[in-house]
């Protein structure tokens, strides 16, 4: 990725350690990013948002006044900050901390310490998110694609729907779990199904299996978006009729490439 493509990014860095602020800022400067404003706490940064809108928010997990999860949810609860790109940098490995970040639509989660290559991927994902491009299909218009998005997380539903709209998909129906989704798909044809794995009532594997029993939907592309790490569960996905799997958090560009391949 060309350094010039990153130079205009305006970054807010929320990190309570001055040493870590310097280290992360130096990494960003390696990519030509100079417009970096540092904050020590979540509330300090939230107050600054009233005066300035950054392109990218980079946060630690543990802040003096809140966690990175709480900060991300605070951003997603307000219309003015909902669409801001968010990147977490943390040595945290606990599912309890990281899963809410994945569900809420983070651009990425980088470990401490991270490499320049890992940062490059996250910054590239940020550009894809901030500058979406409508995709072109071989056989029909992207605006005619009917998509069903299934997730028990309202934030994830909204985030995935936004990514699809950025691609040019306008006909989007949402469902909060597999039961609701299957009720919809029994009576309507969908060109694409994007579903979470772990959901109450009926999970993504059960949903995909049921969809494949419907004659009109046996070849419908099913894209599963999941943060699942259990190998047995991942193996079960392959047997359920799912067309492709992408990890949470995902790069918008990865979703776009998969949608093009699946729908074409």
Image (spheres, rainbow, N blue to C red):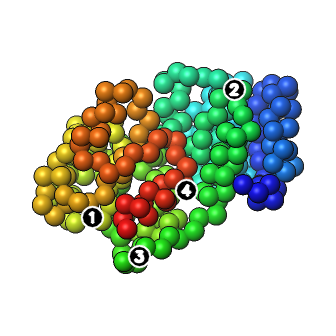
Report how far apart the C-alphas of labels 2 and 3 lie in the structure: 42 Å
Identify the secondary structure beneath mark 2.
loop
| Label 3 CA crowd tier, 10 Å (few <14, some 14–19, many 20+) | few
Disc 1 target residue: 190
Report how far apart the C-alphas of labels 4 and 3 lie in the structure: 19 Å
* Marker disc for residue 13: none
Residue 205 placement: quadrant: top left
Report how far apart the C-alphas of labels 2 and 4 lie in the structure: 24 Å
Chain-order first, disc 1 or disc 2: 2
| Label 2 CA crowd tier, 10 Å (few <14, some 14–19, many 20+) | few
Which residue sits at x=36%, y=65%? 263
Quadrant occupied by the N terminus:
bottom right
Disc 3 target residue: 138
Disc 2 target residue: 112
Report how far apart the C-alphas of labels 1 and 3 lie in the structure: 18 Å
Quadrant occupied by the C terminus:
bottom left
């Amino acid at each position: 990725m060309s350094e010039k493509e990153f130079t205009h990014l305006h970054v807010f860095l929320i990190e309570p350690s001055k040493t870590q602020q310097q280290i992360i800022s130096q990494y960003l400067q390696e990519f030509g990013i100079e417009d970096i404003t540092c904050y020590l706490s979540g509330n300090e940064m939230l107050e600054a948002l009233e005066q300035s809108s950054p392109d990218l928010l980079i946060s630690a997990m543990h802040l003096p006044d809140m966690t990175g999860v709480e900060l991300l949810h605070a951003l997603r609860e307000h219309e003015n900050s909902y669409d801001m790109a968010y990147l977490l940098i943390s040595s945290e490995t606990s599912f309890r901390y990281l899963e809410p970040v994945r569900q809420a639509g983070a651009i990425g989660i980088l470990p401490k310490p991270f490499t320049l290559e890992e940062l490059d991927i996250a910054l590239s994902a940020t550009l894809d998110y901030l500058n979406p491009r409508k995709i072109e299909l071989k056989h029909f218009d992207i605006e005619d694609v009917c998509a069903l998005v299934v997730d028990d997380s309202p934030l994830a539903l909204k985030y995935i729907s936004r990514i699809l709209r950025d691609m040019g998909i306008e006909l989007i129906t949402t469902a909060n779990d597999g039961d609701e989704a299957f009720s919809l798909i029994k009576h309507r044809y969908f060109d694409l199904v994007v579903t979470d794995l772990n959901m109450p009532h009926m999970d993504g594997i059960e949903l995909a299996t049921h969809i494949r029993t419907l004659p009109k939907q046996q070849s419908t592309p099913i894209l599963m978006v999941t943060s699942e790490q259990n190998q047995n569960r991942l193996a079960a996905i392959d047997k359920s009729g799912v067309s492709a799997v992408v990890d949470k958090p995902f790069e918008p560009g990865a979703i776009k490439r998969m949608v093009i391949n699946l729908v074409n």
